């Protein structure tokens, strides 16, 4: 699919979609709980469906309801099972230890760039605790159940390794520990895991460089849970609002508001999601935002370059780089080496996106340098990366000519309704 976007400011209000990060973890915990759990999930995505399908293969009942999903727990996992993780890194890294803890033999498959994404340190830790692997790269088969013990992992490759083990180890008989050999990056993703586990009655003890997981714990269903609004995807529209230096819309004029603004509702400032920091990061550029308990409102304002350590919020880089390209002066993103290991090499593909639109961006070994100026428009590749596709749509707001996004359907990985919501806010999208 190709999407042609004609430059136009965005304004108005949309509701945040459901958090993919929260949904993955809630689904897994609910599947191993002591009774059914109703997950109030207002939206879904390809990645969420992938995790649900893997849990169904293990024996969970997951039924679509009008307001979300009803999860009936697994009673007896099969001895042998297949887990198709599609293109979801979260699904693979979570379900690898979870399925291996419950099944004697598990066949893992995936596609796209997933087989290239790092897994080695998690595989190494599991090899030392009872699991054999037929290969060190997808597709592979595991044999032998995961055993309790000590798991040493670096904290600077993927926090998802730690989440997967925390989800898997609590129900095993006996205490385990996860020892971090390097400082933990993206720690807020682990905090999401800890909060969900606490909701299901699971106790994890945390020390400076390790997690202690008491064994034999029963996941207790909370009965009904509302999945959080997603800050990661809300960030695209908040950035869009910061770029929409626009003439007031008819709606805003009718409401007596002569400064066009964009509001994303359904996102909590108390969320453990690290990407809530989009508010403070946009303020670094000079954007004007107001925030309350349930929503963020952003007003367009003159923007200036800055320096951002992106290590704790790597998923924000593509859209923040678009903001940087529209700001006065240079912006330097640091501590970004892990972005080379995402759905695409996001340092390379973000730089390519900006250059395709007439911007100036330079890859650094562990970062990105963006020189602000004018974006003209043109044809861009999504590189089959949902965040690059959405960043391209946001960039179109500030372009002088239309933007054509190749393989724009990549947004379905996390935000199937992205272009629909884009149009609701006044965006001009035409599928060609």
Image: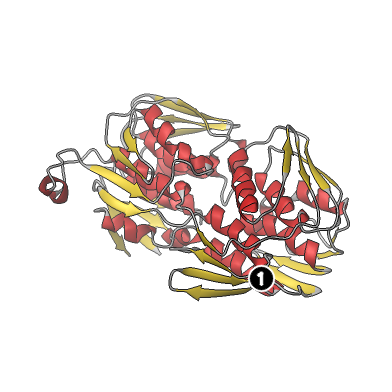
Q: Residue at x 41, y 51 (%)?
A: 390
Percent of width and height locating residue 192 = 59, 47
Q: Residue at x 73, y 60 (%)?
A: 218
Q: Is residue 397 left or right of residue 347?
A: left
Percent of width and height locating residue 110 = 66, 64
Q: Quadrant of residue 422?
A: bottom left
Q: Pick the residue in front: 75 or 334.
A: 75
Q: Quadrant of residue 53?
A: bottom right
Location of the N terminus (image quadrant): bottom left
Is residue 88 visible to the viewer in this orientation of the structure?
A: no
Percent of width and height locating residue 324 = 39, 33
- Picture colour scheme: secondary structure
Q: Pointer 1: what residue?
A: 73
Residues packed near mark 1 inside 10 Å, few (<14), some (14 to 19) or many (20 plus): many
Q: Quadrant of residue 71?
A: bottom right
**Rendered view: 406 above or below 84:** above
Percent of width and height locating residue 325 = 38, 34
Q: Residue at x 68, y 41 (%)?
A: 157
Is residue 131 visible to the viewer in this orientation of the structure?
A: yes
**Rendered view: 85 above or below 151:** below
């Amino acid at each position: 699919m190709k999407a042609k976007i004609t430059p136009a400011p965005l304004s108005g209000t949309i509701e945040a979609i459901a958090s993919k990060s929260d949904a993955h973890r809630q689904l897994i915990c609910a599947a191993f709980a002591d009774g059914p759990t109703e997950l109030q999930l207002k939206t879904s995505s390809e990645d969420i469906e992938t995790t649900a399908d893997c849990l169904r293969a293990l024996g969970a009942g997951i039924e679509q309801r009008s307001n979300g999903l009803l999860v009936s727990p697994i009673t007896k996992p099969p001895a042998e099972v297949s887990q198709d993780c599609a293109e979801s890194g979260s699904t693979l890294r979570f379900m690898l230890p979870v399925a291996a803890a419950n099944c004697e033999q598990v066949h893992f498959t995936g596609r796209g760039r997933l087989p290239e994404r790092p897994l080695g340190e998690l595989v190494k830790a599991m090899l030392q605790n009872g699991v054999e692997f037929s290969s060190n790269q997808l597709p592979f088969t595991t044999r032998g159940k995961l055993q309790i013990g000590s798991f040493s992992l670096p904290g600077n490759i993927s926090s998802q390794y730690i989440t997967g083990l925390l989800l898997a180890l609590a129900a095993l008989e006996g205490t385990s520990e996860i020892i971090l050999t390097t400082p933990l990056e993206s720690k807020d993703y682990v905090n999401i895991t800890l909060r969900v586990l606490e909701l299901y009655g699971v106790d994890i003890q945390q020390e400076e460089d390790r997690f202690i997981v008491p064994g034999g714990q029963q996941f207790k269903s909370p009965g009904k849970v509302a999945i959080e609004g997603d800050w990661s995807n809300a960030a695209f529209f908040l950035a869009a609002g910061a770029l929409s230096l626009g003439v007031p819309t008819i709606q805003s004029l009718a409401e007596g508001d002569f400064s066009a603004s964009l509001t994303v509702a359904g996102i909590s400032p108390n969320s453990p999601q690290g990407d809530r920091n989009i508010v403070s990061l946009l303020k670094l550029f000079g954007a004007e935002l107001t925030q309350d308990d349930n929503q963020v409102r952003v007003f367009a304002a003159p923007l200036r370059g800055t320096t951002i350590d992106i290590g704790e919020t790597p998923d924000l880089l593509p859209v923040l780089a678009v903001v940087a390209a529209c700001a006065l002066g240079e912006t330097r993103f640091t501590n970004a080496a892990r972005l080379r290991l995402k759905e695409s090499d996001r340092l390379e593909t973000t730089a390519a996106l900006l250059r395709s639109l007439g911007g100036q961006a330079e890859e650094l070994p562990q970062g990105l340098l963006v020189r602000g100026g004018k974006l003209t428009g043109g044809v861009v590749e999504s590189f089959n990366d949902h965040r690059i596709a959405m960043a391209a749509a946001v960039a179109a707001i500030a372009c002088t000519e239309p933007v054509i996004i190749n393989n724009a359907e990549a947004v379905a990985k996390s935000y199937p309704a992205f272009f629909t919501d884009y149009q609701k806010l006044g965006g001009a999208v035409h599928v060609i």
